[in-house]
């Protein structure tokens, strides 16, 4: 059923957002990473609306955002290593996967015995949670598997008519989702790369890869994907055209060359139909901030395909490449 979607500026809509959450409703609101679609994390009926609005499979768990650090022990069993990470990186773009307590609904954890928790540093998100007073489950405010939103306009393009309220807090600072870490006795397992890098985490324990049997939010093979087919390749224009099938049509009935766009890291993009530069100065943080917006613009350009140029896979580059691989896996 289609609903009217209201948009409010951050300064005007904080108490309305908190009231809607308290009434069991949905609110799209900004974090420092991407916009989230929030509901009362302790109310499974409210959280079910998230899955419905996003067309998200119930097997994909939600991240629980807490209003204050005292909620951490109320929701999870917290190893000392996890507590040190929280002290260092919260509020901020780090999600901890920890053994859950019974207060957390099964729907939120996808039936697992772990729960994903973080504390956002965005002042608007913090103000809403302070007014609401409870944890909020908030995955990205987009259709499942699609490009994550980094401004209110992206949320409307994805969920307009499906959710009642969008709180506009301007563009997101980081532009990619939080780093997700599972803390175990043998170290820190990165389940999703993000703004908190592997190098930063290494000071708190041995960093390892993902583990079997734990499903993390956004952990499916294909995710963050444009509708336009995308491939990761060195941006040689003529060779890039071979990655996509020839398109029929032209005045004489012969096949025409496909229109290819470039998501550029360092290339000029000469010869491509459309070009989006992640960072003209090859700054990885700027590239991460621009990633989803650039992908969305290329996706809306009526292209036959998109070539994404690889970025250096160090620091934040690992998170960018993780998103590009999932976007290209569609």
Image (cartoon, helix red, strand yellow):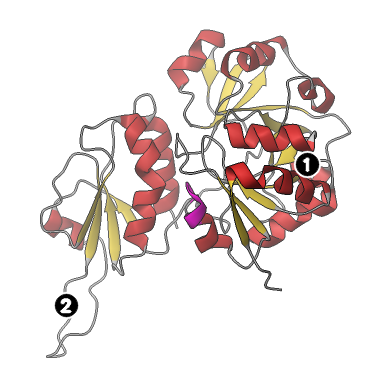
Determine the residue positioned at 70% across, 50% down: 59
Check disc 2 and report the residue beneath it: 256
Q: Nearer the viewer, residue 329 or 64?
A: 64
Query: What residue range appears in magenta?
Result: 148-154
Sequence-first disc among 2 and 1: 1
Q: Nearer the viewer, residue 53 or 323?
A: 53
Task: Tell me the crowding category of disc 1: few under 14, some 14 to 19, or many 20 or more residues within 10 angstroms, Cα based.
Answer: many
Q: Quadrant of residue 96?
A: top right
- In the rendering, at what x and y percent does residue 290 appear? 36, 42
Indicate which disc residue 179 carries.
none
- In the rendering, at what x and y percent does residue 153 appear? 48, 56
Q: Secondary structure at mark 2?
A: loop
Q: Farthest residue to the right: give it.
A: 102
- In the rendering, at what x and y percent does residue 35 appear? 55, 45
Query: What is the number of callouts on the image?
Result: 2
Q: As drawn, is 93 to the left or to the right of 132?
A: left
Q: Quadrant of residue 253?
A: bottom left
Q: As drawn, is 4 to the left or to the right of 278?
A: right
Check disc 1 and report the residue beneath it: 41
Residue 205 in sight in this render: no
Query: Where the N terminus falls, by quadrant?
Result: bottom right
Query: Where the C terminus falls, by quadrant?
Result: bottom left
Q: Is residue 152 magenta?
A: yes
Q: CA distance from mark 2 to mark 1?
A: 51 Å
């Amino acid at each position: 059923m289609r609903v009217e979607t209201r948009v409010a500026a951050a300064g005007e809509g904080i108490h309305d957002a908190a009231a809607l959450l308290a009434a069991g409703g949905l609110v799209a609101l900004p974090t420092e990473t991407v916009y989230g679609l929030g509901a009362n994390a302790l109310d499974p009926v409210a959280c079910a609306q998230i899955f419905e609005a996003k067309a998200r499979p119930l097997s994909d768990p939600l991240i629980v955002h807490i209003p204050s650090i005292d909620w951490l022990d109320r929701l999870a069993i917290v190893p000392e290593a996890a507590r040190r990470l929280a002290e260092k990186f919260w509020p901020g773009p780090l999600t901890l996967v920890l053994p859950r307590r019974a207060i957390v609904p099964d729907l939120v954890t996808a039936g697992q015995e772990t729960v994903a928790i973080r504390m956002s540093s965005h002042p608007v998100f913090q103000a809403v949670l302070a007014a609401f007073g409870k944890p909020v489950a908030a995955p990205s405010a987009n259709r499942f598997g699609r490009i994550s939103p980094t401004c209110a306009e992206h949320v409307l393009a994805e969920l307009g008519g499906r959710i009642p309220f969008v709180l506009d807090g301007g563009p997101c600072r980081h532009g990619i989702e939080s780093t997700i870490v599972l803390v175990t006795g043998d170290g820190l397992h990165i389940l999703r790369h993000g703004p908190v890098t592997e190098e930063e985490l290494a000071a708190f324990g041995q960093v390892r890869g993902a583990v079997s049997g734990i499903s993390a939010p956004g952990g499916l093979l294909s995710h963050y994907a444009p509708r336009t087919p995308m491939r990761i390749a060195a941006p040689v224009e003529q060779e890039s055209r071979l990655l996509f099938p020839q398109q029929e049509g032209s005045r004489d009935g012969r096949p025409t060359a496909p229109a290819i766009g470039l998501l550029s890291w360092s290339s000029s993009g000469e010869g491509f139909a459309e070009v989006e530069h992640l960072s003209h100065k090859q700054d990885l943080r700027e590239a991460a901030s621009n990633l989803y917006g650039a992908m969305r613009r290329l996706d809306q350009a009526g292209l036959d395909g998109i070539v994404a140029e690889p970025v250096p896979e160090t620091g934040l580059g690992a998170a960018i490449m993780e998103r590009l691989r999932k976007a290209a896996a569609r």
